């Protein structure tokens, strides 16, 4: 009862805030993977011309979304009526005050059916961006069609929908009731795309954006790793053009984008190696794209540290086996797994292909194992889920400098204490 009351009050204040500030535009980002990278890319580009508000964390759940939109911190004592009274007072002041923002960018998360649709009770997005429809929380959704229904429901409360055509199967298009649709991607099948003319690890992706609005294509250099990390930037360009940004401001914004911690971020490792830190989380689509990126980069030695993918339900075996079958000995020298699911399903599939495989129950042991044989100028991909996997601790063992620990995910005192207790079991 108390929680429902709080929720309805917060939603009411968001409605009142947007009514009081009609010039403030709202961009909502949903999708199975790539939400945080996409919202960050959008914010970086738009901030070249507009005042942008985006919550840095993953405030994308039912109660945290209204607070994130209003720019109010989550109270420390969530069961305290006094704490929530302070939140309500701050919300009222926000409504009455002159706006200090032009565009709000908000991520929307879905753990179970109905989560995205529930945001439509009080939100009307000027632009809704849908990043992907891939397996997620399958213990709750059951089928990919159910995932698609959920993620695409953002279109029902968005004036314009911008979708990633490369990571959303065309058969789901019938689920979109909104006729105002733009598409983006890297395959060349979308209105907004990026043509990659040259790539180096140090120099980035050099190429140009195609679009229907500008007579001349937008030439830029993108400082990210992997084609799947180019797509969020293309989505950001599509949104920026819809907001009538100047071409030179768009280019300046996309060239300022850098990988965020735990999402295909390159780090310097021991023996002159390159560590691709993709440890924030793992899902089948993201893991496949990360492995493909590893394979495509030239190096004398390729190593994949692959942690279990959580929350896949009945599809876990199939999805882990598919990743294992992607690994071949002519492309990946070592496959090192972390966690029970990866050891049970991914490792045998990779071994059947002829790969050298080693499995560990914990990430620290996996990192220590790799440290023993990593060659000069090797490339190491580190990929895994959050709960009970923590592959970032494998990366920590392999870094050239301890100073780069600060660039890893889940390094706050609270996280370090929780992980210390977790690893003490091994």
Image (cartoon, rainbow, N blue to C red):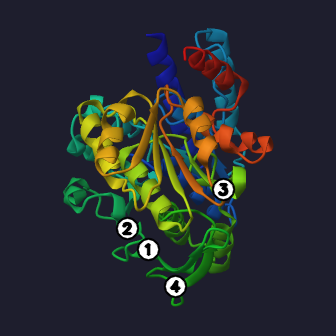
Task: Rate crowding at label 3 as few (under 14), some (14 to 19) or many (20 or more) other CA atoms within 10 Å.
Answer: many
* Foreground residue among 378 and 293: 378
Residue 134 appearing in the image: no
Q: Position of residue 307 (x, y in %)?
A: 46, 37
Give the number of callouts. Answer: 4
Measure the C-alpha gap from mark 3 to mark 4: 41 Å
* Helix, strand or loop for disc 1: strand
Disc 2 secondary structure class: strand
Please tell me which of labels 1 and 2 falls first in the chain: 2
Which x, y percent locates residue 115? Answer: 36, 34
Work out how far the residue at label 2 is from the one at label 3, CA to CA, in angstroms.
37 Å
Disc 1 to disc 2: CB gap under 8 Å: yes
247 or 82, nearer to the observer: 247
Residue 274 shows up from this direction: yes
Q: If the image is split into quadrants, where does the N terminus sit?
A: top left
- Residue at numbered disc 4: 214
Q: Which residue is mark 3?
A: 273
Q: Is residue 317 left or right of residue 70?
A: left
Mark seen at residue 183: 2
């Amino acid at each position: 009862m108390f929680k429902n009351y709080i929720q309805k009050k917060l939603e009411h204040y968001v409605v009142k805030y947007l009514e009081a500030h009609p010039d403030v535009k709202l961009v909502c980002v949903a999708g199975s993977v790539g939400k945080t990278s996409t919202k960050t890319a959008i914010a970086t580009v738009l901030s070249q011309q507009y005042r942008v508000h985006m919550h840095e964390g993953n405030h994308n759940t039912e109660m945290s979304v209204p607070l994130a939109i209003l720019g109010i911190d989550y109270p420390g004592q969530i069961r305290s009526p006094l704490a929530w009274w302070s939140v309500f007072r701050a919300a009222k002041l926000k409504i009455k005050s002159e706006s200090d923002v032009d565009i709000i960018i908000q991520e929307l998360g879905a753990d179970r059916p109905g989560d995205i649709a529930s945001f439509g009770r009080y939100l009307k997005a000027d632009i809704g961006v849908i990043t992907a429809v891939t397996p997620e929380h399958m213990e709750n959704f059951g089928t990919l069609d159910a995932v698609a229904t959920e993620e695409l429901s953002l279109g029902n409360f968005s004036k314009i929908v911008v979708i990633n055509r490369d990571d959303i199967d065309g058969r789901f298009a019938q689920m979109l009731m909104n006729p105002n649709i733009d598409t983006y991607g890297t395959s060349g099948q979308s209105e907004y795309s990026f043509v990659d003319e040259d790539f180096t690890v140090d120099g980035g992706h050099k190429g140009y954006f195609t679009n229907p609005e500008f007579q001349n294509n937008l030439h830029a250099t993108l400082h990210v790793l992997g084609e799947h990390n180019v797509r969020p930037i293309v989505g950001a360009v599509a949104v920026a053009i819809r907001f009538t940004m100047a071409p030179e401001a768009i280019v300046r914004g996309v060239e300022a984008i850098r990988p965020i911690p735990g999402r295909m971020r390159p780090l310097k490792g021991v023996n002159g190696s390159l560590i691709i830190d993709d440890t924030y989380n793992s899902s089948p689509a993201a893991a496949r794209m990360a492995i493909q990126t590893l394979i495509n980069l030239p190096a004398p030695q390729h190593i994949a540290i692959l942690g279990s993918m959580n929350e896949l339900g009945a599809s876990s075996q199939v999805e882990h086996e598919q990743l294992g079958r992607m690994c071949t000995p002519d492309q990946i020298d070592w496959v090192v797994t972390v966690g029970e699911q990866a050891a049970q399903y991914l490792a045998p599939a990779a071994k059947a292909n002829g790969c050298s495989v080693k499995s560990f129950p914990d990430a620290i042991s996996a990192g220590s194992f790799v440290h023993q044989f990593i060659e000069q100028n090797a490339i190491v991909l580190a990929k895994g889920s959050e709960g009970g996997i923590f592959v970032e601790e494998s990366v920590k063992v392999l870094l050239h400098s301890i100073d780069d620990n600060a660039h890893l995910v889940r390094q706050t005192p609270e996280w370090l204490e929780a992980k210390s207790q977790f690893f003490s079991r091994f």
